[in-house]
Amino acid sequence: GCWWAVERKLLEAAMGDSSGSVSIDVERIYFGGKEHPVRTRYGPVSVSVYGDEDKPALITYPDVALNYMSCFQGLFFCPEAASLLLHNFCIYHITPQGHELGAAPIPSDVPELSVDNLADQVADVLDFFGLGSVMCMGVTAGAYVLTLFAAKYRERVLGLMLVSPLCKAPSWSEWLYNKVMIGTSVSAMNLSVPYFFVYTNLIF
């Protein structure tokens, strides 16, 4: 099965029960989107649009070091998920600068963006396409960006679908620990585990 099943009830509640079976050529639609370069106040992003733009908008944001293809292809090749999503939404996949397919390295003189900047970029994307309120779906770091976007622009968010969201920021003690442990046998996965499995609740 696919992890979409966890969120299906949320979509049905938001959009009405999609009880009818919808036949969709998943591969044709998935690879048939149109890519738009969008200039935001904090630099360019790539947005790939799939589906009927007259339908409600669903914004996706990938995890760090991934683009929409590598992050969401498992979901969109699940026939039930693709059928439900593409029947109800026009999907806008946001890919941050430097994460596009075949992207060149980001020049060293380009300022690093904060998570607040990334959230503002999402708002700029909505403005570019003339979108009002949207559904949002993000994975891990992308879920964190969209959560902050929802906190800053509440009137523009109909709902959030978050997969393994990050719920806390690193502390100074963890920064020092990471510096000390560089070059040891401690793996990057061990250091990142606390950010994937936390008990902190997000409260708006």
Image (spheres, rainbow, N blue to C red):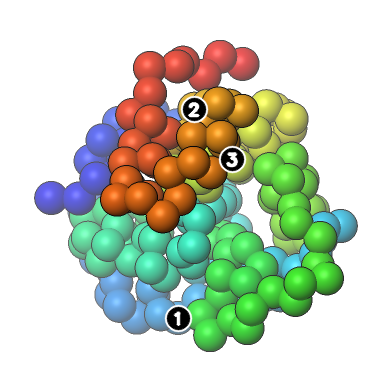
At label 2, the amino acid type is Cys
Q: Where residue 34 sits in the image (x, y, percent)?
A: 57, 78
172 or 195, which lies in front? 172
Which image quadrant for residue 195?
Answer: top left
- Image mark for residue 146: 3
When asked about the image quadrant of residue 87, the answer is bottom left
* Furthest residue in direction right, as rendered: 41
Q: Secondary structure at mark 3?
A: helix
Residue 125 image point, x, y percent: 73, 57
Count of numbered circles on the image = 3
Residue identified by numbered label 2: 167
Query: Residue, x 22% and y 60% (percent of image)?
Result: 78
Residue ID for mark 1: 32
Quadrant housing the C terminus: top right
Q: Residue at x 51, y 80 (%)?
A: 101
Please indicate, yes or no, whether residue 50 appears anywhere in the rendered image. yes
54 to 13, vertically: above or below:
below
